[in-house]
Amino acid sequence: MMLPGSDLAEIVTNLVGLRLEPITTAAVLGAVLPPLLRSSETPTPAVGQPQSKPRSAAPRRKREKSGPRLAAAAPAADEPTDGPRQRARAALAANPDATLTAVAKLAKVSRSTVVNARDELAAEARKRRSGEPSERQDRAQRFLREQLGRGPKRVSDVEEAAAKAHIDIQTLEHARDDLGIVTTRANTGGVHAVQWSLPG
């Protein structure tokens, strides 16, 4: 009597639900299936009858039969060790709006591999951003130099001109910090009296 297909399907479904790395899933199946298949094909001896030892060829034959199923979960022999992560990175780049689970299915990797690939991509993007000023920051710095080149200006006027030039407040604030803009208060008082000027 063979192991029922429904039992086998349930084992595989439960393993997939654990979202393990493909190589780990293959190892677990390799460890669990042979004993189950041996026990399902060995008849239970009647009371008083000696137990016969299972033939060594039977488990090997069963292992060979289950091989193609395991091969789908395991990485290809010629695939580099970082192949799953590279597939996950490529799938993330090609499908930026997809869920992590959908990307994992597309790349045929575990969800945790996709999470790690996403974190790597985000770290690389942060490193690139911090290494050199962006075009928006350069533009905002040029804008401030032009606005304040003839002397101090009220902050409200500078911000209004920035809005017309399509420079958002956050980028303007970063540019102000980068240039070391000096903030002063004019004699007239009030909110509109706050001024910015170039240092020195």
Image (cartoon, rainbow, N blue to C red):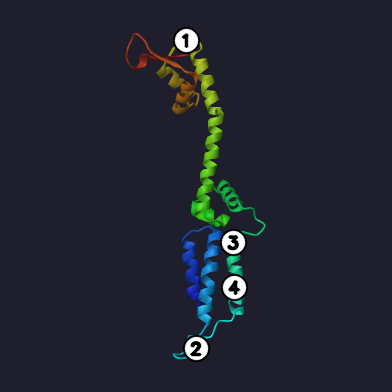
Kindly state the secondary structure of the residue where label 4 is placed.
helix
Q: Are marks 4 and 1 in contact (CB under 8 Å)?
A: no
Q: What separation in Å lies between label 3 and label 2 (alpha carbons)?
A: 40 Å
Circle 3 residue = 74
Q: Residue at x 54, y 35 (%)?
A: 127
**Label 3 neighbourhood size at 10 Å, few (<14), some (14-19), many (20+)?**
some
Earlier sequence position, callout 3 versus callout 1:
3
Q: Which residue is mark 4?
A: 63
Give the Cα separation between the discs numbered 4 and 1.
83 Å
Q: Residue at x 53, y 67 (%)?
A: 29
Q: CA distance from mark 2 to mark 4?
A: 27 Å
Q: Position of residue 143 (x, y in %)?
A: 52, 20
Residue designated by label 2 = 50
- Comparing marks 4 and 1, which lies closer to the viewer? 4
Which kind of residue does numbered mark 3 sit on? Answer: Ala
**Residue 163 appears in the picture as rendered:** no
Residue ID at (54%, 20%): 142
Mark count: 4
